[in-house]
Amino acid sequence: MVNETKYDVVVVGTGVVGCLIAEQALDAGLSVLMLEAGPRVDRQTIVENFRNLPPSLRHHWDAPFPPPPWAPVLETRTPGEENAYLDLTGPNATAYQQGYVRYAGGATWHWAGICWRMTPDDMKLKSLYGVGRDWAFDYETLEPYYARAEYALGVCGPTDAALQWPPKTPRSRPYPMGPLPLGPGEQRFTDVMAPLGLQNLPAPQARNSGVSYDGRPACCGNNNCFPVCPIAAKYDAATALPRIEAKGGKLLTNAVAYRIEADDRHKIQAVHYYDPHRTSHRVTGRAFVIACNGIETPKLLLLSKDDRHPNGIANSSDQVGRNMMDQPKLKATVEMSEPLWTGVGPVQGSSILNTSQGDFRSEYAGAMFRMENMARGSIGAAEALKKGLYGRALDQEIRRLSACTGLLVVEHEPLPSSINRLTLSDKKDWLGLNRPRIYYDVGDYVRRSAEQYTIPTLKKMAAALGATKFDLNPEFLHSDHIMGGCIMGKDPSDSVVDVDCRSHDHENLFLPGGAAMTTGGSGNSTITMAALALKAADAIVSQFKTA
């Protein structure tokens, strides 16, 4: 057993949430240690991993990030690996095959960079529509933290209030940068959708639009934002780590946290971790932040059960691991008689969100629609090869499919549900730790939405675009927006954390980010996670000042 020096703040996880809290703590004069389960890797290595992938794996975003044995994740490089880590059950188990990265920098390596805020209504589902839960505070409380998060990440967005989201909602600060232009495919999609009453908005994005920001260059439209931005124009936490270290923060990689230790007064004393040699280490601190994502955080809490905490750390409510959420996704490939020309600019640059709001939410889920702006060359090549063509005919078909096909996507708003639960599997990983077992059912709220609302809308979109072919994948898929598991609330009997993401059970334990989110809305979750991180960071610093 190796004992490290005691730190003021110990942060487990090096994604966006962990990095934002670590840097704010350092700026307040606190000492900070960060633990990361996986390795530290340079950007060029990931780029080369991506370049060397066979075409069949180019669109599996975790494939360029092969995990070490001690930090496994769900892999997609071979079919047999798909169930090698996550133990998934339930009616929609395949819709929770979450892809995330256990590297220094976390899943921000391969996120799309999209930063949609939740709306005031998204945070009041129970009081407005009689479903789900209400957040423990209102949108106005979170708004300043949204603005701070946008500046911390470097978010570009529209200056025209009519194009901003949420609509008719005051902003305390403008976006740090103006918007990126839409590519030709997205512009056509925007124009065609408008007569249907569907407003395709330019997305706020954590990437630099025409100028450098925070030491990162301007976006040059590489169009492979996931799995990796090759020039670091998009924010990823890996670009924040050198700054954290320059301020005095310490980073330990290949350190797999497996136990949180509490004393007889329920105060957290230490985190235990394994190194790649399966040697155990213990690090002590005054405040602890578990920011491992919405799967790894509740897993660690459950692994930490002891005689005083038989259900696990922070789990007197029996809510740890419950309310697992994502935004269940449906996809439709469309083929047209004339070119659509996606692939100019970022892979995602716009979305339709007015479909996420309305009184219908008392009956079925709202949803976000978009057309992916991904270049279709490799996809078109794969489809053309299936037709048995060769020579000039193959070349012409690749060109046609690359130009004249597109992908329509809908992501549905989830409801928190206690049956969607992460527990510890009897199956063990390389270190002998229980793997996460997750039961997942998208629920009738989402199924009714798909049947009555979103699939008919997808068909209307395809018809308006002049599609000659519409191929809907009927199976719900994952969006990799992992939420729930440590749900926020004012009542300790039915929630895990308070309004500052502090554990109800342990005054010096914070569980911020996606795991704490009360509801998920329809837009990407990262900027809300970042806002919650900054709110938690304020609470941590304040707690030290008053101690």
Image: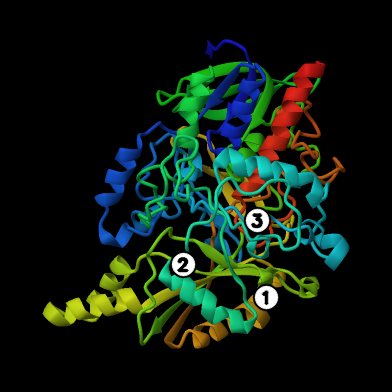
Q: Quadrant of residue 312?
A: top right
Q: CA distance from mark 3 to mark 2?
A: 23 Å
Neighbours of disc 1 within 10 Å: few (<14), some (14-19), many (20+):
many
Residue sitting at x 65%, y 60%: 164
Residue sitting at x 65%, y 24%: 25
Give me the disc on residue 449: 1
Q: Amino acid at mark 3?
A: Met
Q: Is residue 428 depicted above or below 76 in this figure? A: above
Q: CA distance from mark 3 to mark 1?
A: 16 Å
Q: CA distance from mark 2 to mark 1?
A: 21 Å
Please state which of the two labelled residues, at mark 3 or mark 2, is closer to the viewer: 2
| Foreground of the two, 430 or 249 | 249
State if disc 1 and disc 3 touch (CB < 8 Å): no
Asked whether residue 511 is in view, the answer is no
Q: Which residue is mark 3?
A: 325
Give me the disc on residue 285: none
Q: Which residue is mark 2?
A: 372
